[in-house]
Amino acid sequence: MPDQKALLLPQKQGQFVVDNWPIPSPGHGEVLIKVQATALNPVDWKMRKVGFLIDKYPAVFGWDFSGDVEVVGEGVEGFEKGDRVTGMSYPARGNGTFQQYILMPARLVVKIPPSLNYVDAASMPVGYGTAALGLLAAPPLGAGLNPSCDFSVNHAGEAAFVFGGSSSVGQFAIQILRKMKYSPIITYASARHTEFLKSLGATHVIDRAATPTSSVPDTVRALAGGAAINIAYDAISEPDTQEACFSLLSQGGVAVAIQGGEDKDVGGRKLIHIVLEAHGDGEFGEGMWKSLGRQLEEGVIVPNRTEILPNGLAGIIDGLKRMEDNGVSGVKLVALPQETS
């Protein structure tokens, strides 16, 4: 195959550039996917700025994708050329999604139902995977609410809290908690997203402009009305937000954070931090993606609201800068690699 176009980072903490890049060939158990849409995540600009996760350069970043199966490798069953698929890649393994073609293990690829377009499908994997891992996976990977991902458990009468409900991860955390019958589901976000977040399952939205982080624990406990608060998901995960989530827990509760920090276990309450790489690894990862496939078919998981970036892969550069400058709220930025000139 001829070369493809990719958004490359030539060296650690360098500047992105669109350039030619070889198209890989699938090995045993792999599929080659023509990437139709790829979504941006905060970790992308942080990886470039801080220089973590990637050891080999030039490198291709990007985690979320949707597209078409182009070539099926040996030993792969259940997929054929032309299948519409989505999933989450892992750039440190050399298969970032900011390119026109990627290799993926077939066991971690999910078919897209006819009702879902490429852009919406690409908005989901990292956000859903991060929320599901933290909430559902057995310790030490997550809080252990539903390791089988079959959503047979029922937490009616228990309160849950999501810090940053309008973020991509926060939106999926709310939907997963709704599916497990938590009530009330309280979230902290901009008031302008109130109706949308309630449509996902939130029962109360605390306006971040009116309530400082330090007041969140008391506010949440008041809204919970005496219900036990056994789970809090921190989709922002700054030191003060992690402390707020930990402080509001009832005895035996778990707060989940998505970025660095120290785990703690004090007085029967826990704060845990999840690891992105654990998404696709092992029994839980495979079960999680199969569960997502079923939920997409049933239409019970709603994708993020999206904004399509212009200029294909080149548009990602400005999109990441907007994210770094806190210029994106309530939407997932998505690029279309095949539109790269």
Image (cartoon, grey):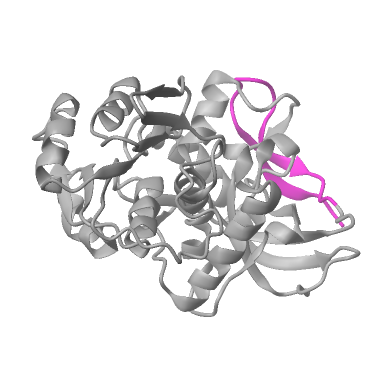
Picture residue at 39% right of the left edge, 54% below the top = 172
Q: Nearer the viewer, residue 67 or 136?
A: 136
Residue 54 at what x, y percent from top left?
68, 27
Q: Nearer the viewer, residue 75 or 15?
A: 75
Q: Is 158 a magenta residue?
A: no
Q: Is 12 a magenta residue?
A: yes
> Vertically, is 223 above or below 36?
above
Q: Is residue 118 left or right of residue 188?
A: right
> Vertically, is 231 above or below 284?
above
Q: For the N terminus, which image quadrant?
A: bottom right
Q: Is residue 309 left or right of residue 255?
A: right
> Vertically, is 313 above or below 15?
below
Residue 203 at what x, y percent from top left?
18, 57
Count numbered badges in the picture.
0
Q: Quadrant of residue 233?
A: top left
Residue 109 at what x, y percent from top left?
67, 61
> Vertically, is 287 above or below 259?
below
Picture residue at 35% right of the left edge, 59% below the top = 175
Task: List the single residue furthest toward the bottom.
Answer: 114
Picture residue at 62% right of the left edge, 59% below the top = 287
Residue 255 at what x, y percent from top left?
36, 35
Q: Is residue 40 left or right of residue 29?
A: left
Q: Is residue 310 visible?
A: no
Q: Is residue 304 visible?
A: yes
Q: Is residue 324 left or right of residue 250?
A: right
Q: Which residues make up the magenta segment?
A: 1-24
